[in-house]
Every structure is written in structure tokens, then in C-alpha cells.
Image: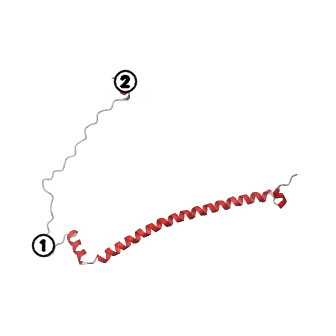
Amino acid sequence: MSQGPFAKLGLSRLWIVLAAVGGILLLGDLNRRMADARRLERDTVVLQTETSALETQQAELQAGLAGAGSDAQVEEWARNQARMVRDGELLVIPLPAADVVTPTPQAAPPRPELPGSLQVWWALLFGG
């Protein structure tokens, strides 16, 4: 009976198979961890972008909030949205003309009837 190179070391085939299976499991785990790390790096970039956009929006909102109580903004809101006027002023609201005619919807013209498949074949085969 011939002895293999591993037999000289005193390793049986069972231990070699167990080591191979353990190595495959270890490589699978490392591959999963690397995929998770790549996904986390991509998520980090996306979240940094969202964070910077939200910080910009927060700065804009804080600037708007700081000026919200100013007299100029209150007057602009009162005149444009609430339609308020000062003493001595007259509010004018333009109305649409009374003789505005709304167009009546008309039915679409009927589509011409398409020839049947028999008529198409007849025209192709016999030219008429």
C-alpha cells in the first residue's frame, strides 16, 4: 500500500476534508463581510449627501424664520396674501369679464373604418 505525502505527516483524509470545508466556510464569511463593508461605504456617501442637503435647507429655514417677524415681511404678507390695505387705501380686485364664453366640448370626428383582414389580403393578392 502506497503512502501519500499527507500520510507522512500523520494526517488522515478526514482531517484534510474538514480543513477544506472549514476553509470554504471561512472564505464565504470573508466575502460576505467585504460585501457588507462595500454596501456600508455606499450608504455613507448617500447619507453624507443627504445630510449636507438637509443642513443647507435648515440654514435657509432659519434665515427665513429670523426675518419672519420683520415689518417688511409682515406687510408683504398682509398685502399680497391676506389682501389687507392701510387706512385711506382702496382694495381693488379685478374680476373676469362677464361675457366669458366657455367652449362646449365637441365630439371627435368618427375614425374611418379599417378594412378587415380578408379585404387586405384580397387587395394584396388581386390588386383591388
Q: Which residue is mark 2?
A: 122
Q: Which of the 4 image quadrants contains residue 80?
A: bottom left
Q: Residue furthest front?
A: 5
Q: Is residue 76 above or below residue 99?
A: below
Q: Residue at x 21, y 74 (%)?
A: 75
Residue type pointed to by label 1? Glu
Tell me residue 16's x, y (percent). 77, 58
Q: Residues within 10 Å of mark 1 (few under 14, many from 20)?
A: few
Residue shown at 23%/76% (left/top)? Answer: 72
- Number of the label disc, if any, that sits on residue 89: 1
> Where residue 115 sits: x, y (%)?
33, 30
Kindly state the secondary structure of the residue where label 1 is placed. loop
Q: Residue at x 23, y 78 (%)?
A: 71
> Residue 23, percent across and down?
70, 60
Q: Amino acid at mark 2?
A: Trp
Tell which circle, 2 or 1, labels the residue nearer the N-terminal end: 1
| Quadrant where the C terminus is found in the figure | top left
Spot the residue most to the right.
Answer: 1
Specify whether 9 is left or right of 22: right
Label total for image: 2
Residue nearer the viewer, 106 or 67: 67
Q: Quadrant of residue 63?
A: bottom left
Image spot of residue 70 (x, y percent): 26, 78
**Badge 2 element:** helix
Residue depicted at x 57% and y 65%: 37
